[in-house]
Image (cartoon, grey):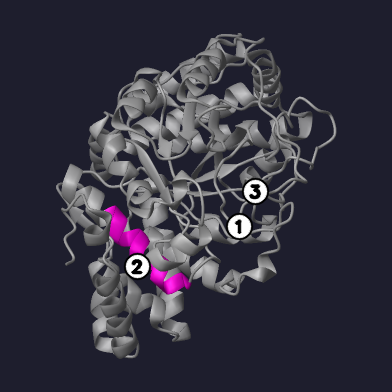
């Protein structure tokens, strides 16, 4: 039985409810009166001197996904873009993944880290190697990392992850510092989530891979990840352990995308119904080529057009949730979906263990092929040339604005008085410490223009004062 408030995965991600949703979407995909009402429901509304968005249910959003009318698609894109601008402005948060270990005891058939793969070299970073990786990332200008590991309780126990987080936060190199560490590790216990919270992590991220239970069991034939319910219920345990910022995601290409889309939104609805706050982020990775993995072996791949529509509908359905896209995607694809709702992107990523400390990009331990191989400086300049502010801000996490407190800030519209000036100040740091002369020229022009968009006059004055102090060598201001 479908129950969004249940803590049982089979009830809050209910197979029969998803099938009924898909049938309902097929039945109503050409019902223009219904579609019009759904799109109007999703429109931003003025409430209490601010903007408010209701979002959409998994059924309503699935109707829009099933509709193939070109005019409706244009309305979806237009609405997604307006919602994105209303709540996230033109800021794009920057981060990089850091792979600590590729030892893994699971048998996931789509991942090169699977236990039976004997061609990929296995590697685990020492704390000294982590230091070198972090310094290399700091020297690019990164302030926010996402830790990645395979699942192996012997080679990569929770104690190793905790020690690595402590090491990362301790490294001060020139003007560099990692100010937020997000963690993407296997489903674990409430006790271990408490330890991660105490270690000062930002968001706990875990991709579901697929919400289709039968497919999930076939794709994860061996290892602890085979337990669908334990994996799917991980966010409940994380929140019980005190982590109030969690990040969802599916790996598009493993199962039929309409099924995954409904399941993803149902998971978000479950967190909202059970804990009063939905996911902090949703990631949208697509299956890519990797060592001994050929994406053509999976027959559920989606086109760039379908991918863009999915991104737009996620933005409409969960308007206050951040959206993440990685360097799995090409520059052209990233350019399109940033406009439609994506709020965080990775830059200059290396998906190999120990890859940042090496001058040439190593590929022997990569988890997947990287499509966008530009430097961070090139990505930053590209964003600014499209009128987006690359933000290295980590203020909300460090000021305790997480979980429902962040969502209230976002919903009230006050995010513009925090995030916009914070983005400009962290961009200024990047320009002063890491940017090429060409990028610096573009950035200084942008900062001067964007100061005028800070709504509160006193906030704008303080931001201008702090920008001058950053020029004098002082760092780490935040609202």
Location of residue 14 (image quadrant): bottom left
Q: Residue under circle 1?
A: 110
Compared across the picture, whether 288 is left or right of 426 comes to: right
In this rendered view, identify the residue nearer to me: 416 or 208. Answer: 208
Whether the magenta-drawn stretch holds residue 265 is answered as yes
> Where's residue 304, x and y in %?
60, 69
Q: Nearer the viewer, mark 3 or mark 1?
A: 1
Helix, strand or loop at label 3? It is loop
Which image quarter is the N terminus in?
bottom left
Look at the image and give the residue range highlighted in magenta: 256-268
Q: Is residue 202 magenta?
A: no
Identify the residue at image location x=57%, y=38%.
Answer: 150
203 left or right, relative to 106: left
CA distance for labels 3 and 1? 18 Å
Image depth: mark 1 or mark 2 in front = 1
Location of mark 3 (residue): 327
Residue 192 is drawn in which quadrant?
Answer: top left
Q: Earlier in the sequence, mark 3 or mark 1?
A: 1
Q: Taking 471 as reference, is 205 left or right? A: left
| Most foreground residue, 222 or 462 | 222
Query: Tag 2's secondary structure?
Result: helix
What's the residue at 27%, 66% (across, down)?
A: 42
Instruction: Say if 259 sits above or below 119 in the image.
Output: below
Query: The residue tagged with tag 1: helix, strand or loop?
Result: loop
Mark 2 / mark 3, whichever is N-terminal? 2
The residue labelled by disc 2 is 262
Q: Nearer the viewer, mark 2 or mark 3?
A: 2
Residues under labels 2 and 3: Cα distance? 25 Å
């Amino acid at each position: 039985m479908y129950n969004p408030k249940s803590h049982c995965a089979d009830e809050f991600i209910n197979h029969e409810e998803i099938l009924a949703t898909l049938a309902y979407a097929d039945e109503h995909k050409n019902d223009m009166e219904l579609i019009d009402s759904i799109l109007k429901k999703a429109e931003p509304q003025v409430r209490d001197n601010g903007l408010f968005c209701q979002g959409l249910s998994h059924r309503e959003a699935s109707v829009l996904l099933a509709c193939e009318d070109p005019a409706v698609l244009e309305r979806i894109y237009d609405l997604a873009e307006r919602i994105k601008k209303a709540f996230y402005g033109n800021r794009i948060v920057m981060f990089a993944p850091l792979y600590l270990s590729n030892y893994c005891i699971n048998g996931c058939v789509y991942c090169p880290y699977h236990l039976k793969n004997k061609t990929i070299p296995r590697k685990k970073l020492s704390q000294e190697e982590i230091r070198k990786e972090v310094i290399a990332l700091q020297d690019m200008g990164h302030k926010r990392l996402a830790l990645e590991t395979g699942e192996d309780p012997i080679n990569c126990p929770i104690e190793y992850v905790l020690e690595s987080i402590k090491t990362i936060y301790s490294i001060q190199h020139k003007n560099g510092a990692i100010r937020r560490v997000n963690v993407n590790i296997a489903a674990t216990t409430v006790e271990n989530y408490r330890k991660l919270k105490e270690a000062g992590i930002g968001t706990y991220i875990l991709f579901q891979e697929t919400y289709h239970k039968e497919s999930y069991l076939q794709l994860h034939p061996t290892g602890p990840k085979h337990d669908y319910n334990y994996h799917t219920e991980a966010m409940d345990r994380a929140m019980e352990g005190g982590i109030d910022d969690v990040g969802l995601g599916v790996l598009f290409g493993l199962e039929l995308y309409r099924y995954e889309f409904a399941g993803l939104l149902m998971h978000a609805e479950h967190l909202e119904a059970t804990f009063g706050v939905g996911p902090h982020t949703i990631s949208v990775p697509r299956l890519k080529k990797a060592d001994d993995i050929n994406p053509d072996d999976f027959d559920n791949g989606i086109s760039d057009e379908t991918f863009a529509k999915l991104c737009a509908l996620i933005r409409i359905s969960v308007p206050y949730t951040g959206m993440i896209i990685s360097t799995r995607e090409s520059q052209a694809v990233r350019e399109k979906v940033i406009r439609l709702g994506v709020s965080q992107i990775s830059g200059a990523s290396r998906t190999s263990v120990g890859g940042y400390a090496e001058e040439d990009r190593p590929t022997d331990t990569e988890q997947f092929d990287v499509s966008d191989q530009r430097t961070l400086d090139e990505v930053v300049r590209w964003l600014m040339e499209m009128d987006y502010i690359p933000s290295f801000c980590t203020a909300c996490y460090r000021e305790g604005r997480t979980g429902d407190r962040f969502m209230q800030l976002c919903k009230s519209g006050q995010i513009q008085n925090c995030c916009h000036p914070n983005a400009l100040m962290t961009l200024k740091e990047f320009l002063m410490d890491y940017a090429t002369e060409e990028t610096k020229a573009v950035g200084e022009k942008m900062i001067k223009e964007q100061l005028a968009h800070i709504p509160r006059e006193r906030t704008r004055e303080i931001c201008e004062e702090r920008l001058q102090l950053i020029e004098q060598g002082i760092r780490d201001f935040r609202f």
